[in-house]
Amino acid sequence: MWASPGYAGKIDLEGVKRLPNVAADVLRECGPLRIADLLQRIRERGYRSRDGHDKVIRALRMALYRNRTFERDKAGKWSLV
């Protein structure tokens, strides 16, 4: 991320993080969550808040299933390994 030396606007660092990193941060703070609850907490932080719900939940599902850092229990809750 970069900005010109004279830039005085707000810098949104949450937008710089990748979705799996943001999900991991939320799970560290909140413990195991169902995907809908996880998405709600991620969006409360302002991450991809302008994108459509279906688009973000699809991206979140893919990120969780593809990343070995996450696991899903029998109750459908996601957590960190």
Image (tube, rainbow, N blue to C red):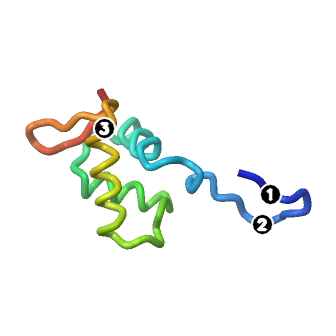
Q: Secondary structure at mark 3?
A: loop
Residue 81 vs residue 32, the one in the foreground: 81
Disc number lying in front (1 or 2): 1
- Mark 2 = which residue? 9
Q: Secondary structure at mark 2?
A: loop
Q: Position of residue 64 (x, y in %)?
A: 30, 43
Q: Are marks 1 and 2 in contact (CB under 8 Å)?
A: yes
Disc number lying in front (3 or 1): 1
Q: Residues within 10 Å of mark 3 (few under 14, many from 20)?
A: some
Taking the spot 83% from the left edge, 64% from the top edge, the residue there is: 8
Residue 56 circle label: none
> Quick one: which residue is furthest to the right in this view?
6
Compute the Cα span from label 2 to label 3: 34 Å
Q: Secondary structure at mark 1?
A: loop
> Quick one: which residue is furthest to the top in this view?
81
Q: Residues within 10 Å of mark 1 (few under 14, many from 20)?
A: few
Taking the spot 49% from the left edge, 59% from the top edge, the residue there is: 47
Q: Position of residue 36 (x, y in %)?
A: 25, 58
Q: Position of residue 60 (x, y in %)?
A: 33, 53
Q: Mark 1 vs mark 2: which is more N-terminal?
A: 1
- Mark 1 = which residue? 3
- Mark 3 = which residue? 31
